[in-house]
Amino acid sequence: MTFMFHSMISMFHSMFHYDLYVSLYVFYVSHYDLYVSLYDLYVSLYVSLYDLYVSLYDLYVSLYDLYVSLYDLYVSLYDLYVSLYDLYVSLYDLYVSLYVSLYDLYVSLYDLYVSFYDLYVTLYELYVSLYDLYILVYDLYVWLT
């Protein structure tokens, strides 16, 4: 009898486990679509986030390329500015040197003019002195004769 009692308990126990198993299986099957939907949602969210990451990375790379291009443009414009400034300084130096050279030439020519004028005045004074001497000698000759 005890054996039978144990067997019955075992059978009820096994039926209970079987019923639990069947009810869990039914629950699983009935909610399988929900699991699949949730998994699809998870995959779609993951793919969307990955696409967003890739798009943001592409945007970052594009902005970095734009930055590099703008920096290259800035460097080129700065080089152009430096070259133009060097040209301006060279032309200004040429202008100053030409101006100084022409002024020096003017001063030299003026000095030459002054020298010739002094020579002219000296020669004229010599002429006047010789003329005065001639007149003096002539007056002396006239007075003596």
Image: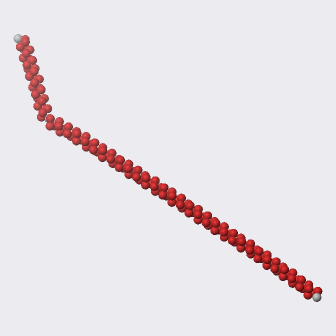
- Which quadrant: the N terminus? top left
Residue at 30% across / 44% down in the picture?
54
- Position of residue 84 relative to residue 27, above or below, is below
- Of 26 and 98, which appears nearest the observer? 98
**Residue furthest right as drawn:** 144
**Residue furthest top as drawn:** 1
Q: How is the image coloured?
A: secondary structure
- Of 123 and 55, which appears nearest the observer? 123
- Apparent side of residue 67 relative to residue 143 in the rendered image (left or right): left
- Of 101 and 58, which appears nearest the observer? 101
Residue at 7% across / 12% down in the picture?
3
Q: Position of residue 36 (x, y in %)?
A: 17, 37
Figure quadrant of residue 43: top left
Q: Position of residue 52 (x, y in %)?
A: 28, 45
- Position of residue 47 relative to residue 113, above or below, is above
Q: Position of residue 40 (x, y in %)?
A: 20, 39
Residue at 74% across / 74% down in the picture?
116
- Apparent side of residue 14 relative to residue 129 in the rendered image (left or right): left
Residue at 66% across / 70% down in the picture?
106
- Apparent side of residue 80 relative to residue 116 in the rendered image (left or right): left
- Which quadrant: the C terminus? bottom right
Figure quadrant of residue 28: top left
Q: How many marks?
A: 0
Q: Position of residue 67 (x, y in %)?
A: 40, 51
